[in-house]
Image (cartoon, rainbow, N blue to C red):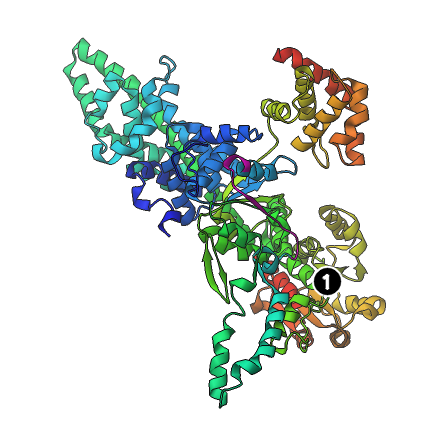
Amino acid sequence: MHNSEQDNLPRLIRSIDEVDAGLVAAGYIASRQISTAIYIAHHLRKPILVEGPAGVGKTELAKSVASWLMLPLIRLQCYEGLDESKALYEWKYGKQLLYTQILRDKVGTLIGDADDLGTALKRLHAFGDVFFSKDFLEPRPLLRALEQRRGAVLLIDEIDKSDQEFEAFLLEILSDYQVTIPEIGTVSAAVPPIVVLTSNSTRDLGDALKRRCLHLHIGFPDEKLEARIIASRVPGIDARLLVQLVAFVQQLRGLDLKKLPSVSETIDWARVMVLMHAAVLAEDVVRDTLNVLLKFESDIETAAKRIADFTQKAQQAVVINR
Amino acid sequence: MSASRPTPLKSIRAAASEPLRRFLQVARGAGLRVSAAEGIDAARAVDLVGFSDRTILKDTLGLVLAKTADEKVLYDETFELYFQRDEFSAANDPQTNPGPEAQDLRQWTPGGLHETGSSSGQSLSEMLESDERAALAMAMEIAAHESGIEKIRYLTQKNRYARRILEHMGLHELERQLAALRRTGTPDAAARAQLLEERVERLWDAVRDFVERSLILYARGEAEQFRERLLKSARLANLDRRHLERMRVLVRQMAKRLAIRYARKRRRRQRGQLDVRRTLRRNMSWGGVPFITAWKQKRIEKARVMVLCDVSGSMAWVSQFLLMFLYALTEVLSDIRSFAYAGSLMEVSDILEHQPIDEAITRVMASMGFGSSNYGNAFADFEKGWLKHVTNKTTVIVLGDARGNGTDPRTDIVGRLAKRAKRIVWLNPEFRSSWGTGDSDLYRYAPYCSLVRECSTLNDLERVVTDLLEEAA
């Protein structure tokens, strides 16, 4: 990256195509929509809220953006009960305790020669502020992201798993890129981080949060895009097998299943096929490896009935594509 | 920190904001909730990507404006519908291919919109004669804007708006010219008149088509919202059977909202142990010796509910919706037991729990509904079978008009019930003014109830259930 900009300045993304190329270089095949989202988010300085089924590459997107822009990736995994002491900052209690101990030991020598209470207190006051200062502060992901000199990619993963209170707490950071620590004051970001929030929609997120974010929905990719993704992730795969495999999975997604196979499952499946040295998609191989794609017994049963039909169609897909 | 400041607003080109402003209006009309802040974001985003690439524009605005899966679908439709209008002039005439000027229209309309005004420097007859589609299309857009097309709401307004648009485009003048041409009587003039008439006819079709699309664009979301508002505040007893499906959807939506809100609260309070961090912090002044402890848990009380529903005659409707509401809330209410009564009382919890709620309710109604009610009997049945299950944590909800057809109201049982239960809530779908008239015993029951409330619409129901959950949380 030989730009004229200095190293400590954030990189400016100039076009959507640049995003596209950058992500490809980082090993992430993005649809046009995804690239547009990153481009807009970068220029508008807005967080992106990414929703979509599990395994379509929501988390991967943040990682790839970080590796492309060579920024540190700071990840905050959300769960129920996550609070600010784990997300933002925590006081170093041990250190603070030690400090009180030392203070107690030294307090005698410190105020020993004071004649009256007023003077003694005045001397003590000079030390009071140290207690809640940056020295005793343990930064957690959110604060760390703000402190990065060159900016960062902040990934807030599975925000829907956190409590509603936490969501409200995030609002300040998302709109102003600053946080308020009651004992110290407001900390603003030197360079606003690129914030990616992901959600699996286990609950509806609040309007306030959504209003502050760009909303990107990543669905299952179409046949062409999925083939490109697999090709980049499983380099050794035979072109014919690749097309058949993708065609099969695409058909599977048309079924009424509890959990539809996602891109990550397709990748796993492709790897299994490569390991098994399969050259083409054959019915018996599919039957044996179906549990890689489908994670529920009932789903496997449903799909098993259609294997022959789907495999045949998938084999034809190659002929048409050629 | 000027470096992190967003693009200043004034730098957004005025040209870009006008068509965008109109699109936002359309989007709001279609039912997308677009806040002012999102409007500004949209303007900044469009400023960044420009209008030239339609798919990028669509993706960009989609990122900013549509924030749920439903909204994305709505947004896609609206976007297509709105921007499809550009191509109308070419599409309406099979003889010409879509000329480049038709596609470029969107780009140069905004800038020229206000300066040129409705005349566009050409009269309508000139435009028609030279058959300049782009000019016509633009004149039509402008005329439509001037005639306030975005206020269109009903199908019946279609012709009025079409005429108004044509008048703004100069229809009167054209008619005068046509009349003059016919008066001249020369074959040349007649041919010209003929040509103009044909083209005016075609223009009428185009305008009507345009108005129709506008109607879909501007009025769809609002009609939907209007109907929802109406249904929520309509008396349940008066509702038509054909609204039933819609009502069910509404009830489920409302219940889901409540469930989300209160489920969170409860789950958080269920965790419970010593909160080491807060304890330490609180005791810092004593050198960390824990004088004061901080706990993660608070005692929570789940709402235990017993619902007694009158399923006789007109009450059946309201009962149905109350039950539907409560059973949609099973996540946040523990232990709902439901009873149906008319002449006598029976427990229906089992039926309701083990079948899809819609079918279950129909079954309950069929097996005992639509008889004449006897409150005394029903309460006696309840006392005999279930009073022992009522504890000081139970909220008893009675839904009924308290009209026992002159039978003994047995207020003594209600008195005993009130002593055992946490509280009794009496919901009456009748107007307050008719309480206690005729055979209504409501005021004889009222002293034993902690709350007596009129409850006849979905909004009332939601309020009652919210109170119930607030009390429990």
Which residue in the structure is indicated by mark 1?
B307
Residue at image position (74%, 55%) is B369
User: Residue B166: image x %, image y %?
Assistant: 28, 30
Residue closest to the far top: B187
Chain that bears disc 1: B
Residue B371 seen in render = yes
User: Residue B43: image x %, image y %?
Assistant: 37, 41
User: Residue A44: image x %, image y %?
Assistant: 42, 42
Q: Amino acid at mark 1?
A: Val
User: Hey, which quadrant is residue B339 in on the image?
Assistant: bottom right
User: Hey, which quadrant is residue B44 in on the image?
Assistant: top left
Q: Looking at the image, how many numbered discs can be counted on the residues?
A: 1
Answer left or right for B351 relative to A60: right
Answer left or right for B90 relative to A198: left
**Quarter of the figure with the C terminus of chain B:** bottom right
- Is B384 a magenta residue? no
- Is A69 a magenta residue? yes
Residue closest to the far bottom: A115
- Is residue A161 shown above or below B155? below
User: Residue B204: image x %, image y %?
Assistant: 33, 25
The residues colored magenta run A67-81
User: Hey, which quadrant is residue A273 in on the image?
Assistant: top right
Pick whichever, B104 or A124, lies toward us.
A124
Badge 1 density bin: few <14, some 14–19, many ≥20, Cα 10 Å: many
Pick whichever, A236 or A240, lies toward us.
A236
- Is residue A24 shown above or below A73? above
Label 1: which secondary element: strand
Pick whichever, A307 or A16, lies toward us.
A16
Residue at image position (19%, 17%) is B182
